[in-house]
Image (cartoon, rainbow, N blue to C red):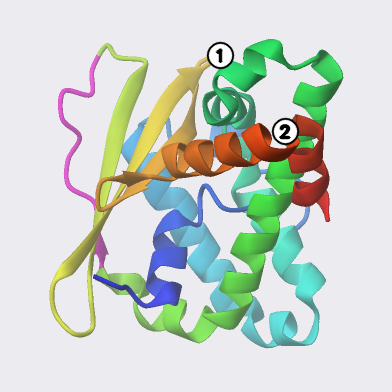
Amino acid sequence: MRYPGGLIVLLVSLLLSPAAVGETPPAAQPADPRELVMHVSNELVDALRDQREAIRQDDAIAYRLADRIVVPHIDFERIARWVLGKHWRSASEAQRAAFMDGFRQHLMRTYVSSMITYTDEILAHADEVSYPPLRDPNGSDQVTVRSRISLPRGGTAQVDYTMVKTAGNWKIADLAIDGISLALTYRKEFSAQISRNGLDALIADLKQ
């Protein structure tokens, strides 16, 4: 099933971007991974609602929104290692750093451009997302936070956030839309590109 782009952007907002001034102090963030996802999603929606007109005039505001609110909660290195797979092991330190930077830029561009395009739709359906309770959340350093959204024409979409605890803080390591992993999708795509043209060419493409 195809889903309206704005609704999916709302659900994947945590992984696809970084949002306006400075970072929220770690102490202010919920310790529970489900509460954290809900907190950040709500914060993003509130920021979009407050700055909707300003974003239409200046894309840079959306980028700043995408850095402050989301990026601190993403484990970019873990995602990059998983996405590159065997190519991470053979890459030099310089290539690893360049890939993480390029991949982050790519995700941010994708997210922000969608966020700008679908701001009205995101805000119109922000209250249609639910977060079922965690399954066996205690004692694990990796959990799945599930979210469901009611679609305008019936049915639901499900987005699962893979959360890992790093240095005592929960961060996002992957998400899946109706069972399709974002990291695995990128892994297959990038592996094919690396096989054809090499890792350095992929990094250059990501940064364009």
Give me the residue at 67% from left, 55% from top.
108
The stretch in magenta equals 129-138
Image side of residue 56 versus residue 131, left or right: right
Q: Residues within 10 Å of mark 2 (few under 14, many from 20)?
A: many
Mark 2 or 1: in front is 2
Quarter where residue 11 is shown = bottom left
Crowding around mark 1 (Cα neighbors within 10 Å: few <14, some 14 to 19, many 20+) is few
Q: Is residue 128 visible?
A: yes
Residue 66's disc number: none
Quadrant the N terminus occupies: bottom left
- Residue at point 49%, 86% (across, down): 120
* Residue 19 is at least partly visible in this image: no
Percent of width and height locating residue 124: 38, 83
In the drawing, does residue 92 fall left or right of residue 53?
right
Q: Position of residue 70 (x, y in %)?
A: 59, 48
Q: Does residue 119 lie above or below 27 as drawn?
A: below
SS class, disc 2? helix
Location of mark 1 (residue)? 167
Identify the amino acid type marked 1.
Ala
Circle nearer the N terminus (2, 1): 2
Q: Which residue is mark 2?
A: 100
